[in-house]
Image: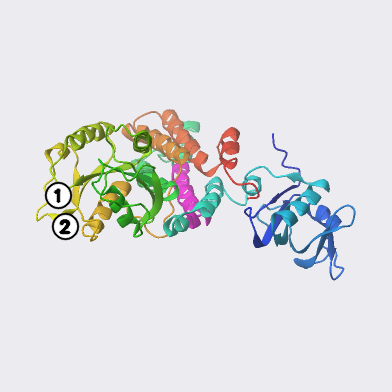
Amino acid sequence: MTNFEDTIAAISTPPGEGGVGIVRLSGKSALAISAQLFRSSREKDICTSSQQVFHGHIVNAAEETLDEVLLHVMRAPHSYTREDVIEINCHGGAAPLNAVLEAVLTAGARLAAPGEFTQRAFLNGRIDLVQAEAVIDQIRARTRAGLQAANAAASGTLSQRLHAISDQLAYALAHIEAAVDFPEDDLPELVTPELFEHVRAAYDQMRHMLATADAGRLCREGAVLAIVGRPNVGKSSLFNALLRDTRAIVSKHAGTTRDRIEEYITLSGIPVKLIDTAGLRQTDNEVERIGVALAREALENANMILFVLDAAAPAEEEDVCLAQELAELTLPTVVVLNKADLVDVCVSPACCASFADTVSISALTGDGLKKLEDILVGHLLGGVNLDAGQAMLNRLHQKESLRRSIESVERLLDDTTLSPEFLALELRDALHALGEITGETTPEDILDKIFSTFCIGK
């Protein structure tokens, strides 16, 4: 088990070369350890000076200079972890950073575990679990919408909404428990229809949050979109058209794409990984067979499928077989009739009747692409509008906790004539489940698992 009494240290900047790299320390001995190694260019004592930024050099135990640095002092509780925090700004290369970190560890610090700085900020009450998880979302955000959502959560917007709901449920619980504790006392009626309306208002807010949870996960994790079809229907052309770039080789010869090609695009703030796959057909070519196998693997991992057909040619047996295969996957599938510029009217083949959405496009001219993108966004968001800066639940464990909380409230609202003891039990369960999201009732092993996904140094 991690000892949170230790002073911890880690490199807080990514590997590689840069102008500046940071070694961060946090803990009760952070100042003392840094003072052992730091030599101020103006002979300042970092332990007693009110100054916050110092220029000087870091030396090792043999008084050998390791690097010229700027040292930032952030004293408890006015720091990220609410402990004494020191950030040593070194030159941003592997050699100086590792040398300084090694000196810090030799002087008495312990190497931080992944996410331990943020875990200490959580345990010391500076942030709750929602805000802590938003920190890693800020780091990993792939789109502006994802970053704005992470910023909103990190600022406490989502936590405030959750606490407001908890306060409403706690208010109702207090009245119901009073009715249990003082049944014979001369008190006004405590369990009233108005009280249940209070609970229903909280319930409606919870249902709205649940409805946006999948969109929140997509904003954070992104979606995988596989482009499939038989050879030479224009899959790579569509791939390039959606990217607005020439990334995949396009040729009139069938079977050009052998490998799986992946690139990211952004659709309404959602990062979408496009996968251009080999044409799905029976082949004796060993390399092409490998490509077909990779294409089928992409299907298994996709959130959505673009099934591409040649609008300028009749459906072939390979199209029919593939349509049957895709229909069995039960994944959202959009039929794309490509090469629409070569025909007057695009007619969807009968083999695609089981798919709800069909769109005619020309990957060559770009006609129909906007309509295709709108259809994809509609499937991905399910009607949810992604407002800039909207804070949403975006993790499976958050959604699961909220779902259990909603179920407890639903049981209460389904039969408000239950005895106050049973009503109170449902509200306690609902509040406990909400507390798992903010970290108030989250089991320790779950907390450890969450913070272990963070990078070292954060």
Q: How is the image coloured?
A: rainbow
Crowd tier of the residue under label 1, counting other residues whose Cα lies within 10 Å: few below 14, some 14–19, many 20 or above:
some
Residue 294 picture quarter: top left
Q: Give, as a three-letter code, the residue at label 1.
A: Ala
Q: Is residue 204 left or right of residue 179?
A: left
Quarter of the rendering occupied by the N terminus: top right
Q: Earlier in the sequence, mark 2 or mark 1?
A: 1
Q: Secondary structure at mark 2?
A: helix
Q: Is residue 326 visible?
A: yes
Q: Position of residue 449 (x, y in %)?
A: 57, 37
- Residue at the image point whose x is 39% and y is 47% from the top: 261
Q: Residue at x 59, y 33 (%)?
A: 445
Q: Is residue 62 magenta?
A: no
Quickly name the residue at label 2: 341
Q: Position of residue 21 (x, y in %)?
A: 68, 59
Q: Quadrant of residue 331?
A: top left
Secondary element at tag 1: loop
Name the residue: 29% across, 53% down.
237
- Amino acid type, label 2: Asp
Q: Report whether 342 appears left or right of 94.
A: left
Q: Between 46 and 329, which is closer to the camera in this rendering?
A: 329
What is the span of residues highlighted in magenta in the rendered image?
150-171
Name the residue at 58% across, 45% down.
454
Residue projecting furthest to the right = 62
Instruction: In the displayed orientation, state which residue is furthest to the left.
Output: 344
Neighbor class of circle 2 (other Cα within 10 Å; few <14, some 14-19, many 20+) is some
Q: Is residue 157 magenta?
A: yes
Q: Is residue 378 above or below residue 43?
A: above
